Amino acid sequence: MSTTTLKAWYWVHKWTSLICTVFLLMLCITGLPLIFYHEIDHWLGNAAEPPDMPVDTPRISVDRIVEAARAQRPDDAVQFVSREPDEPHVWFVVLGKTPDAQEASAFYTYDARTGELLLDYPLDQGFMHFMFTLHVDLFAGLPGTLFLGFMGLLFVASMVSGVVVYGPFMRKLPFGTVRRERAARTKWLDLHNLLGITTLVWASVVGITGVVNTLAWPILGYWQYTELADMTASYRGKPPLIGVGSTQQAITAARAAEPGMDLSFIAFPGTLFSSPHHFTAYMTGTTPLTSKLLKPVLIDAQTSAITAQRELPWYVTALLVSQPLHFGDYGGMPLKILWALLDVLTIIVLGSGLYLWLKRRNISVEEWLHDVQPEASDAVVSFPAVPQRESA
């Protein structure tokens, strides 16, 4: 590799790292508790455990649960009814001020067998809400989300450029070398390089999936204006619904239409995930991978007849795969623990990179190279003798 090319890659690594490091540190720190969101929520008392009952206890109609939720907030609209595979005895009901409101006004948990209200989940408050919102959009909505997506792209660029410059700068040292006898700056440089290469694959996965997740609203918006609009084209121009039919019948019809799948959630007419004339049931598979994928089934909100069903396009599938992978939500607790350990190592990489830049900002490139490879720095690369500010 020529000197000019190596200098260019090093410049990319330096500035992409410096620009995104503070935000990446914030994302790693806030992301650590989010890996265990479900467990922490239980520990904080924000999850309900249904009482023990005989296994064959029948479930009541979902319609009764929907009516109970409406009675709690008669001026609001029911938006979604959902379930979780690991919590088969509960239904979750989300309400909004209007059917198409982007913010929920209530989130209820009901016993699927008795219809008892188990929990009125506290919205927009608490430690986990703060960490989640800071991690997702910096409390700035879509502009904050897209800004963090740009920081994620810089992070990916810093990793690619870091790999390019790692080989030439470290080829004279055995892999994993940490020169403990040298100055603190050199020891931290070796540790930074070692942990950076060790966590490279994981950091790349989390960085790329994080960027994809920041595009969630644009991706879903595009799907709604293309695929969903095409699926509901025959209903254009029809008058608004006078009344909405049975939620239970809609769920039953969707399960019959997709016998190898089960319901993840059902969106009510007028919501952002449905149409003004349909229930839309989002069906999911039963394997670890397919349980994260969805297939929409449109049901006429008055007749409960299936009107359309199709696979989601590749770009929505990529989003659905990225969301759980970003937080290690595929392999249960062992994978979450692994994700947390790698997250901590990445925090060390980012922190050490910031420390090295602060320590080296007034050191020339030649002095930096001497710290890296005193044995053969001239043989590795030769820069003009102009003082520069270099990072790790």
Image (tube, helix red, strand yellow):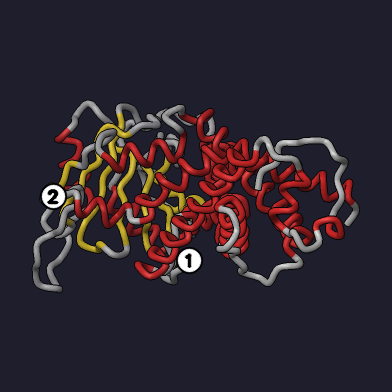
Q: Quadrant of residue 255?
A: bottom left
SS for dot 2: strand
Residue 290 circle label? 1
Q: Position of residue 241 (x, y in %)?
A: 37, 32
Q: Amino acid at mark 1?
A: Thr
Q: Is residue 133 visible?
A: yes
Q: Residue at x 67, y 47 (%)?
A: 158
Q: Quadrant of residue 359?
A: top right
Q: Position of residue 380 (x, y in %)?
A: 83, 58
Mark 2 burial class by Cα count in 10 Å: few <14, some 14-19, many 20+ = some
In the drawing, does residue 57 fall left or right of residue 25?
A: left
Q: Is residue 21 above or below residue 343?
A: above
Q: Considering depth in this image, is 282 or 27 the residue closer to the camera? A: 27
In the drawing, does residue 189 fall left or right of residue 245?
A: right
Residue 118 circle label? 2
Q: Residue at x 57, y 63 (%)?
A: 181
Please report whichever mark, 1 or 2, sits nearer to the chain's N-terminal start.
2
Q: Residue at x 16, y 49 (%)?
A: 45
Q: Considering depth in this image, is 250 or 270 the residue closer to the camera? A: 270
Q: Amino acid at mark 2?
A: Leu
SS for dot 1: helix
Mark 1 burial class by Cα count in 10 Å: few <14, some 14-19, many 20+ = few
Q: Is residue 312 visible?
A: no
